[in-house]
Amino acid sequence: MHQRRVRRTGRPRPSHHHSTRRVRRITKRPRTTGRQAVPSPHPARRTWQSQSRSRDGDVQMTAARLTDRVAIVTGASRGIGAAVARAYAAEGAAVAVAHEPRPEPTEQAEKLAAELAAAGAHVLPLAADLADPDAVERLAAVTRSEFGGIDIVVNNAAASSRAPWHELTVEEWDHVHQVNLRGSWLLTRAAYPDLRASEHACVINVTSVMVETGQPGAVHYTASKAGIVGLTRALAREMGGDSIRVNAVMPGAIRTEHEAEVAPDPQAVFERIVSAQSLKRRGYADDLTGAFVFLASDESSFITGQVLNVDGGWVHY
């Protein structure tokens, strides 16, 4: 008879029998879009254990940095979220790949989950509309039920649209804030009992360089991402007493599938973006994963309330 192995935290470690083809539908309301993949020039990360060398030159295998931890990554069907899910799985975490409840993101999430499972990871794709408070609660509940708890929450999913500030509708403003800002707060709250019980609890929010630079046509998105900075700092103060770290990553202009949809001419975007950066190349999703792994690992155990810019030197402090 198959029996689950028990993790050091006292929660059952997920077993390989979870099917990556099973997608839990958490809501009924579809939202934003997603299409082609944007390949990164960086080699794919597939190292499930890290290597170090002893003084005599022998290669030694060391434990992955997120072994036996459970992460929820929202907006993980593609782009930055998918890259983070891959990196966390490579570091030994079990990952709930949260995505929009539409056919295309569902297919992308299933494909990602199958890829990671084939490499030995514990993954579960979960559909959830983050604008729906009940769906957010169920996302946390299903993750808890399947994996035994939650140690890491990555609030990465974001809704956006483009319009001059005076032409935005109330519905557009509200939807962007419901997903980006309120959804981040709701998922953190839903996962709080698990985070409080974890020895490695952390929340990583995702803001945007547009908070620092501003950009015409995105006032609702920029305001929501500025709110993420405030949310991060306020939660760090309130959750620190529970030994829960809360930080944020501020990506710059990252070449993702979304950018390819709204700006299909990569050369024009390159010339405009790179002129503002200190580093004269484009950023890709894989350029961000080191920051997310660092902030989720014990290497950042005394860091909270911080915003880590990963923008090629666009903004300097």
Image (cartoon, rainbow, N blue to C red):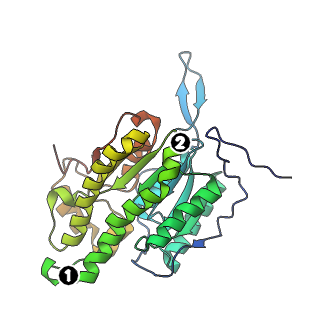
Alpha-carbon neighbours of circle 1 within 10 Å: few (<14), some, or many (≥20)? some
Left or right: 9 in relation to 272: right
Relative to 52, residue 31 above or below: below
Left or right: 83 in relation to 307: right
**Mark earlier in primary sequence (1, 2):** 2
Q: Is residue 178 visible?
A: yes
Left or right: 279 in relation to 75: left
Alpha-carbon neighbours of circle 2 within 10 Å: few (<14), some, or many (≥20)? many
Residue 85's spot in the image, x, y percent? 50, 55
Q: Which residue is mark 1?
A: 168
Amino acid type, mark 1: Leu
Q: Along the line of sight, which residue is nearer the eye, 3 or 194?
A: 194
Q: Is residue 44 visible?
A: no
Q: How many marks?
A: 2
Mark 1 falls on what kind of element?
A: loop
- When asked about the image quadrant of residue 36, the answer is bottom left
Q: Along the line of sight, which residue is nearer the eye, 77 or 275?
A: 77
Q: Which residue is mark 2?
A: 66
Q: Name the residue: 39% across, 36% down.
A: 300
Relative to 123, residue 307 above or below: above
Mark 2 falls on what kind of element?
A: loop
Residue 194's spot in the image, x, y percent? 53, 50
